[in-house]
Image: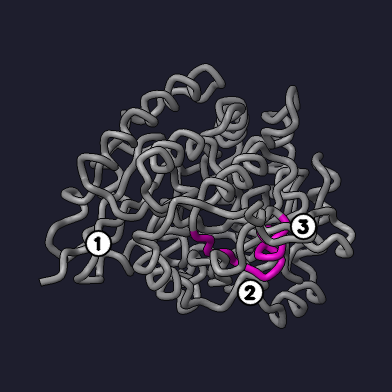
Amino acid sequence: MTTPLTVAVFVGTRADLGPLLPVIEALAGDADVRLRILTGVMYAADDLAQALPPSGSVPSWHERIVALADPMTEVTVGAQLEQGAVIARGAGRALRDESVDVLVVLGDRWELLYVVPPAVLLGVPIVHLHGGEVTEGALDERVRHAVTKLADQHCVASEDAAARLRQLGEAPERIHVTGAPGLDRLAAAAPADDEALARLLQVASVRRPLALFTYHPPTAQQGAPVGQWAREAAEAALAVCGTVLATHPGMDEGRDEVLAALTSLAATEPRLHLVPALGRDYPAVLAAADVVVGNSSSGVIEAATVHVPAVDVGERQRGRLRGDNVVHADEGRPAVEAALRTALSAGWRDRTAAASNPYGTGGASQRILDIVRAASGGTRAKHFVDLPRDSGRGGGERDREEEP
């Protein structure tokens, strides 16, 4: 009888959970995989179990979740440093105690700096999802590329991301263009009707256009008035749209300022509905929205799949590949309002309806499952692949150092 492969997936916040859900479900459905889900930033074990889709499998989600730390109650640099130390200890302990064969991580969140190194030290192969992308307006940019150099296998969402990993010296056999796994749950998403949306928002009716709004702190811009920027973006959405459904910002420094600004605005503007997260309702709500606005990757990566126009605000997502559905806006109410009017125009909606998603068409989770299953074992050594000198990007003439 074959021993099941023990695979750990780290889920820190909802930023991880949404894109990882199809991968988690694929792993959970594989009889040859023993799945463990690690958490410890936004979620307690019970909260994460509730956020996951209903499971009829045995063991249940509760039995698969390992909390590395208690959830954070504040988000400051000091709190992040303290939480990171606890997460690192918890990750090392969990990887040993659970005899983990492969660790799966996604993206670029600061907490990966504490989850991934213990795996490296313990010799646990790391499969990294969504590497090679660019978000120059957030510190996530640095974290993402750092994790690339620590990871063993790379499941990237697009060919341009794969090219960047080659620039970083990663061997071609380690790089797999799988597409974005978060699109798997959107490909067949049916939009929620207005009656269902009204129930969700606890209102008599939904006024169109409906905007789905998320604003995260742009962490690369120190000292920025993030609360003011978030409020102005929300005010612009209210000026153009009938209903604005806003979700809480991510677990970054500046979160409290953004949340306070949106809470204050929602207290005086009944058309602004502020919720912590949409969870299982997200695919249906996204498909039902008339426009996505803010600086979340949701508008840039996911909205094109359900043919919804998106307004990307500010610098957080600067440099990221985007489809023809996305309009960019500088910070400030006038710029965001103008971009929203463009996004909601008949011409732009026609453009969005015809747009393809550069991050794939679905099916990524099954491709990722195959890569995860093959990742266990192998050498811990990684060679740096230099680019040819005539590429114009530097590098050496040899793919690896020759024996003297």
Q: What stretch is highlighted in magenta?
A: 153-167
Amino acid type assigned to the residue bearing label 2 in the image:
His
Q: How many labels does the image show?
A: 3
Tell me which colouring the rendered structure shows. Answer: one colour
What's the residue type where badge 3 is placed? Leu
User: Which x, y percent locates residue 10?
Assistant: 38, 47
Pick whichever of labels 2 and 3 is earlier in the sequence: 2
Report whether 58 appears left or right of 64: left
Amino acid on which the number 1 mark rests in the picture? Leu
| Disc sitting over residue 340 in the figure | 3
* Residue 17 visible, this angle: yes
Q: Can residue 271 be seen in this view?
A: no
* Residue 404 x, y percent position in the rendering: 66, 51
Tell which residue pokes out farthest to the bottom in this image: 354
| Image quadrant in which you'd find residue 388 | bottom right
Separation (CA) of disc 2 from disc 1: 38 Å
Q: Going 71% across and 82% down the picture, which residue do you hit?
A: 354
Which numbered mark, 3 or 1, is in the foreground of this view? 1
Labels 2 & 3 near each other (Cβ < 8 A) = no
Is 295 in front, or is 3? 3
**Of the image marks 2 and 1, the number of the one nearer the N terminus:** 1
The residue depicted at 25 percent of the width and 56 percent of the height is: 6
Occupied quadrant, residue 69:
top left
Q: Where is residue 245 in the image (x, y as percent from the top left)?
A: 55, 51
According to the image, label 2 marks what residue?
Answer: 307
Instruction: Tell me, yes or no, whether the highlighted magenta stretch contains residue 154.
Output: yes
**Horizontally, is 275 left or right of 305 in the view?**
left
**Residue for badge 1:** 5
- Spatial CA span between label 3 and label 1: 48 Å
